[in-house]
Image: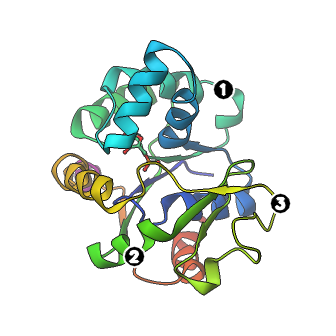
Amino acid sequence: MKNIMFIAAPAAGKGTQAELVVQKYGIPHISTGDILREISKEDSEIGNYVAETLSSGKLVKDEITYQLIEDRLKKDDCKNGYIIDGFPRNIDQAYEYDRILEKLGYEVGNVIYINVDKNTLEKRITGRRICEDCNTIYNINDKNSSPQVESICDNCGGKLYQRSDDNLESFQTRYNTYEEKTAPIIEHYKKQGVLKEIDGNDSVENIFKKIDEIIRD
Ligand code: AMP
């Protein structure tokens, strides 16, 4: 299948939708945010730098993301398609991604822009909870996405946690960063003729239906 990229503001549901794509199509989900959260747990200079940057809501240095993306895309499981979420995050990263794709002989595939209003994002950000074992995402502000037992994952029984950057203060920084740095990449992919826009102010199921219509051909 074609590769898939999601572009969307923070808390627009990229991770949730990516997991649904993984369940249906079995392709790997590559999230720079998830990879960086793992690095942030390391007790090292880079681990501390990444942890501080993530909590502040700013972007980590481009060079750190280039190496980890290239190394990940080289793995065999990416050969039959993958979904990339959280990269590229600015125009320099978009040009670097073009170079990495060319080097590996891959196509950019379907670039899906999930458009969500800022008010909806603010509501989602404070309610998001994640399983520390299997990364399933819940939202306690939405009864359709809440866990059955408070703070416990329905899938594996793991404990749920709240991301250190899921508060309104970090959200404001992340949203401003998105508008200033990430939104311009939409034009980059429009020019390449690969951009598909969908309305993300909808239920998880309906958004997935719209994504599935794009990716299943
Ligand atoms: P996410 O899980 O996609 O919301 O990403 C969480 C945080 O990880 C972001 O706020 C950034 O600090 C960092 N991050 C994720 N992807 C990138 C990237 N491509 N470039 C720089 N920083 C990133």
Relative to residue 84, is residue 70 depicted above or below?
A: above
Please provide percent x and percent y for residue 13. Answer: 48, 65
Q: Which residues are magenta?
A: 188-192
Residue at label 1? 75
Q: CA distance from mark 2 to mark 1?
A: 37 Å
Q: Give the labeled residue for mark 2.
A: 123
Q: Residue at x 34, y 31 (%)?
A: 60
Is-magenta flag for residue 90? no
Name which residue type carries label 2: Lys
Place of residue 135 in the rendered image (x, y in percent of width and height, measured from the top left): 67, 52
Q: Which residue is mark 3?
A: 157
| Amino acid identity at mark 1 | Lys
Mark 3 vs 1: CB contact within 8 A: no
Give the quadrant of ligand 1.
top left
Q: Secondary structure at mark 3?
A: loop
CA gap between label 3 and label 1 equals 30 Å
Query: Where's residue 37, x and y in %?
Result: 53, 37
Image position, residue 59 (x, y; %): 31, 37
Q: How is the image coloured?
A: rainbow
N-terminal label among 3 and 1: 1
Classed neighbour count for the residue bearing mark 1: other residues with Cα under 10 Å, few (<14), some (14–19), many (≥20): few
Q: Nearer the viewer, residue 74 or 16?
A: 16
- Closer to the camera, 94 or 153? 153
Q: Quadrant of residue 114?
A: bottom left
Question: Magenta region, mostly helix, strand or loop?
Answer: helix
Does the image show residue 212? yes
Which residue is depicted at the point 71% across and 35% down? 77
Quadrant assignment, res 96: top left
> How far apart are the alpha carbons under marks 2 and 3?
25 Å
